[in-house]
Image: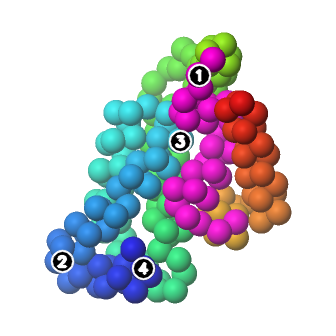
Amino acid sequence: MTEQLFEECISQIRRNEKEGLRMIYEDYNPMIYSAVWEIVRNREDAEDLTADFFIRMWDAAESYRPGKGHRAWMLTIARNMTIDFLRKRRREEPVEELPEDAARQRTVEDSVVETVSLRQALDALKEDERQIVNMKIMGELTFKEIARILGRPQGTVAWCYQNAIRKLREVRL
């Protein structure tokens, strides 16, 4: 979706016309789901949060400023609401096993398997590497946009992306 078409859809949303939301949903549902899943690593939570994202975006349509990059704006909303979800969950539920421990265990098991799927390859990456690769490839964001979203230097983001790609190549061999 072009920047201009996105702005037209946002204008429709501001006029309470659901067609704008439908068009954005159809184009960006996979990108938002992927970005959320990379953080929560749970299908049910990712589906719920993705649905919540589009409701939140409808409510936040007034805050969108044209020309600032709509993908970065959407991914910032998705990332922030997902992190808020995780913080709330941590306060409400005792955690028996840390998600990082489960991911590490999966990565070790996956390395034993000869045929490595893309998902297994991504499991070999650190969380921040997965997020950056996801934003760069699925979100089609620039390193500058990713750096702004994550609050990290652009050079660090580019370096992290290159390391992640190198790791993915090694796992796929």
The residue labelled by disc 2 is: 16
The residue labelled by disc 3 is: 38
The disc placed on residue 115 is 1
Image coords of residue 135 (percent x, y): 58, 57
Q: Check if residue 127 falls in the magenta segment.
A: yes
Separation (CA) of disc 4 from disc 1? 37 Å
Mark closer to the observer (3, 2): 3
What's the magenta region?
A: 114-143
In this view, the residue in front, 3 or 81, is 3
Mark closer to the observer (3, 4): 4
User: Which kind of residue does numbered mark 1 sit on?
Assistant: Thr
The residue labelled by disc 4 is: 2
Work out whether residue 86 can be spotted. Answer: no
- Locate the C terminus and report the quarter of the image it occupies: top right
* Vertical side of 94 occupied by 84: above or below: below
Pick whichever of labels 1 and 2 is earlier in the sequence.
2
